[in-house]
Image: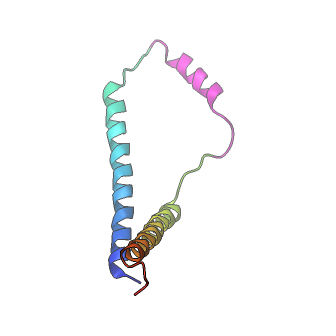
């Protein structure tokens, strides 16, 4: 096992999660900045939302799901990186020496 690939995989997972969190913060800031309350029509919007909401369970990820997906991203990166390195080495040395 190449330690460098493991570290790269963990960094890749961290970068993906940091990008996701950054995007969530940025979109939340933009929604907050552009929000205009409408006191007159507030009950109409509530009724509309109540009718559009489907019944069922809303998926809320817990820490175990997030940790598992982080590990999955890191392992996926490791596998792809190892495969690419082996393929590159095979192309550089086609006779197998």
Q: Residue at x 39, y 63 (%)?
A: 13
Assign the C terminus to one quadrant of the image. bottom left
Assign the N terminus to one quadrant of the image. bottom left
The x, y position of residue 21, in whole percent, is: 36, 50
Q: Residue at x 42, y 74 (%)?
A: 82
Magenta segment range?
40-57
**Residue extending farthest right:** 55
The x, y position of residue 47, in whole percent, is: 60, 21
The x, y position of residue 54, in whole percent, is: 66, 35
Q: Residue at x 49, y 18 (%)?
A: 42
Q: Name the colour scheme.
A: rainbow
Closest to the observer, 38 or 92:
92
Q: Residue at x 58, y 26 (%)?
A: 49
Q: Main secondary structure of the magenta part?
A: helix
Residue 48 counted in the magenta span: yes
Is 3 placed above or below 45 here? below
């Amino acid at each position: 096992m190449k330690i460098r690939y493991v570290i790269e995989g963990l960094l890749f997972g961290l970068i993906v999660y940091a990008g996701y969190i950054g995007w969530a913060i940025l979109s939340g800031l933009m929604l907050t900045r552009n929000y205009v309350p409408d006191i007159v029509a507030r009950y109409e919007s509530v009724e509309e939302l109540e009718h559009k909401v489907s019944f069922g369970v809303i998926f809320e990820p817990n820490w175990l799901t997030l940790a598992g997906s982080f590990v999955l991203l890191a392992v996926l990166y490791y596998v792809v990186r190892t495969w690419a390195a082996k393929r590159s080495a095979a192309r550089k040395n086609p006779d197998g020496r």
